[in-house]
Amino acid sequence: MNETPETLHHYTTASGLQGIFAPKPINGFPRVPTERSLTLWASDARYLNDSQELSFAANTLADAMLDCVARDDANHKDRITNLAERIRVGNFTDPNPGIDQTAHTAYITSFCSRADLLSQWRGYGANGYSIEFPVDVLKSFLVPAMRAGNESIGYLGASQLFPVHYKLDESIIEAAAEAIVHPASYSGAAVEKAVECLAQFKHDAFEEEQEWRLIYSAGHQYTACDFRPSPTGMLIPYMQLRYTPFNLYEPERDTAYPGKLVESVWVGPSPEQELRVESVTRMLNQLTFGDIHVTHSPTPYRG
């Protein structure tokens, strides 16, 4: 079992860095101050750079579901058998005929335990930055409630942080299977649990990344998302995760998070690193984040 570190690092571009720290209101909570707010993007797992996202562990999870389903309830066994076979082929639609069927997926924000990892700088080149978040802050990011962007509903709930596993850990898969096949889960919750489990596993070719993930499983019809273009022209579905140190319902109270919201920002290997450090420091100071340490990578990579 992976020991949870105190901080994790999120690699991003210059525009991503700006977007994370830009002050924005929290939808549904107009009294909450915009300063010291943070925004992260969580992308649909199926559009990430691993072509086996949500499929790498699918057969193993389906087998585990069939192994632990109760044999004395023929109807429930048939439902689970059907669900397991659909999971094998990546069909994550809600199996409950009593509600509108909708496809489910996992929205993911990625982190790394290392601030200065060459493979990550290669991905972001001269525009790369690494932002160090306390894990306690990451666990407090708000996920969209129902339809994101609807100010009458807004954001609720806390994010769930998981380590990525680069081998098929049977204990994790079996625990997920038991929760999925439980009769109380036979609805969209069963599919959400399945997708959440599958999003925790990747091919061992990615092991160097030592990735951690904020994972939010949701149905397409239940939670609206935004779209951004990829460099290849693909439209990537994503949703915004939000953080505020203020109490959502009584922001006037002294409820601000007492610690640092972000520990550090690293400027990646690039020309004129000192100027980049200066400009990032000035931006953070103006946005009330003057307590963040800004430094640069010593890695001799030209991009």
Image (cartoon, rainbow, N blue to C red):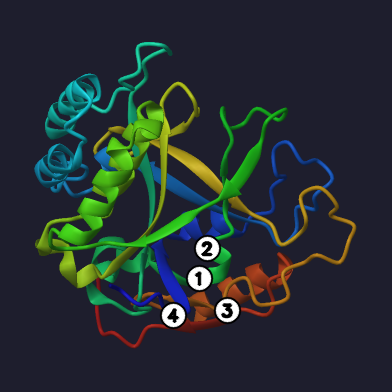
Distance from the alpha carbon under mark 3 to that under mark 2: 26 Å
Characterize the local packing of mark 3: few (<14), some (14-19) or many (20 or more) Cα atoms within 10 angstroms. few
Question: CB under 8 Å between callouts 1 and 2?
Answer: yes
Residue at image coords 84%, 55% = 251
- In this rendering, the label closer to the viewer, 3 or 1: 1
Q: Could you tell me the amino acid type at mark 4? A: Gln
Distance from the alpha carbon under mark 2 to that under mark 4: 28 Å
- In this rendering, the label closer to the viewer, 1 or 4: 1
Distance from the alpha carbon under mark 1 to that under mark 2: 5 Å
- Of labels 3 and 1, earlier in sequence is 1
Where does label 1 land, which residue?
135
Disc ID at residue 278: 3
Where does label 2 land, which residue?
138
Characterize the local packing of mark 2: few (<14), some (14-19) or many (20 or more) Cα atoms within 10 angstroms. many
Where does label 4 land, which residue?
273
Q: Taking 246 as reference, is 172 left or right? A: left
